[in-house]
Amino acid sequence: MTDTNKVPVLVTGGAGYIGSHAVLALKDAGWRVAVLDNLVTGFRFAVPDDVPFYHGDIADADLLQRIFAEQGTGAIMHFAGSVVVPESVDNPLKYYNNNTAKSRTLLEAAIAGRVEHFIFSSTAATYGSPATSRVTEETPTRPINPYGWSKLMTEQMLADAAAAHPFNYCALRYFNVAGADPQGRTGQSTAGATHLIKVACEAALGKRAGVAVYGTDFDTVDGTGVRDYIHVTDLAAAHLLALEALIAQPSQSMTMNCGYGRGFSVLEVLDAVDRVTNRTVERWMQDRRPGDPGELVSDPALLKATLPWRPQFADLDTIVAHALQWERRLEELRRPD
């Protein structure tokens, strides 16, 4: 893509885990990028010093219009939101506010500000517990938790808005995102995070006593939940390619799965952590959590057919190694001078 087609991009939630990787990918590829984040779960250190940063909320329409005017925003990558499935079951209205109502405000502001392209951070949780082991975009969307519903509602708003306005979007349905920037510039930094690989790396480094395994009676290879783990850097690359496609084809919108098409059980992931660290992580067998499907694996065929996306880090041990490298780096960042 020529530089003349590289519109300025606003990344909401750009100080968070996936958003900060998207910022680095955009910056590395020569895009102009700015970040909006309320720093509730994000970290200021995750945003490069030379990237314009706005501390605020996506529900602040006045702030959004000021950012669009100052930055000349032509596209939005929207990562801001809440992402913990069990919490969504316990506190559904938080998720419908953060993920749905606030996204509506952002979308309305984008259309009013003539921002024509929108990349949405969606989720495989929109599929619920699918009847098939491999999930395509044609698989019925039947969320089984408020998190999945909150994201699916936003997808519907995007589709309706694109039908009514000069605006297109790409909703990327993530499977389980893991790993960290191979250069060690950013990673999953949230204290008390629930991502399995991060939790296991923390346990391997002595930050936790062990890892809880929620559910041992699923109909899977070893009874534990099976997920499709995608390296966060490969995921960020998919966002850039999707943005290029939206700009090249302004009348088309897309919804695509982001995964590798292979699942690993919880115990297989913990075995990988043991291999990479040469330690044995303590495992605590627990009952299933509400809202957790037994198996969720992507079919990424549409993504690969639509975009020139070829993953670079589709190896579980590599994903674990990068996550572990970031976990050690995080200790340095948090160590008092």
Image (cartoon, rainbow, N blue to C red):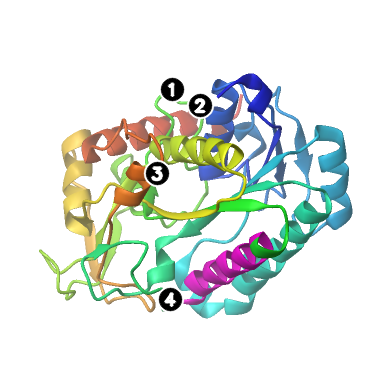
The answer for how far apart the CA atoms under marks 4 and 2 are is 34 Å
Q: Nearer the viewer, mark 3 or mark 4?
A: 3
> Is tag 1's residue or tag 3's residue first in the polypeptide sequence?
1
Q: Position of residue 165 (x, y in %)?
A: 73, 58
Three-letter amino acid code of the residue under disc 1: Gln
The answer for how far apart the CA atoms under marks 3 and 4 are is 25 Å
Return the mark for residue 183. Answer: 1
Mark 2 burial class by Cα count in 10 Å: few <14, some 14-19, many 20+: some
Q: Pointers 1 and 4 in contact (CB under 8 A)? A: no
Identity of the residue drawn at 54% across and 66% down: 151
Answer whether residue 171 is magenta in the image.
Answer: no
Which residue is the site of mark 2?
Answer: 185
Which residue is the site of mark 4?
Answer: 143
Secondary structure of the magenta portion, mostly? helix
Identity of the residue drawn at 37% across and 47% down: 303
The answer for how far apart the CA atoms under marks 1 and 3 are is 28 Å
Q: Nearer the viewer, mark 4 or mark 2?
A: 4
The quadrant in which the N terminus is found is top right
The quadrant in which the C terminus is found is top right
Please tell me whether residue 112 is drawn above or below residue 327 in the rendered image: below
In the image, the segment drawn in magenta is 145-162
Q: Pointers 2 and 3 in contact (CB under 8 A)? A: no
Q: Secondary structure at mark 2?
A: loop
Name the foreground residue: 103 vs 214: 103
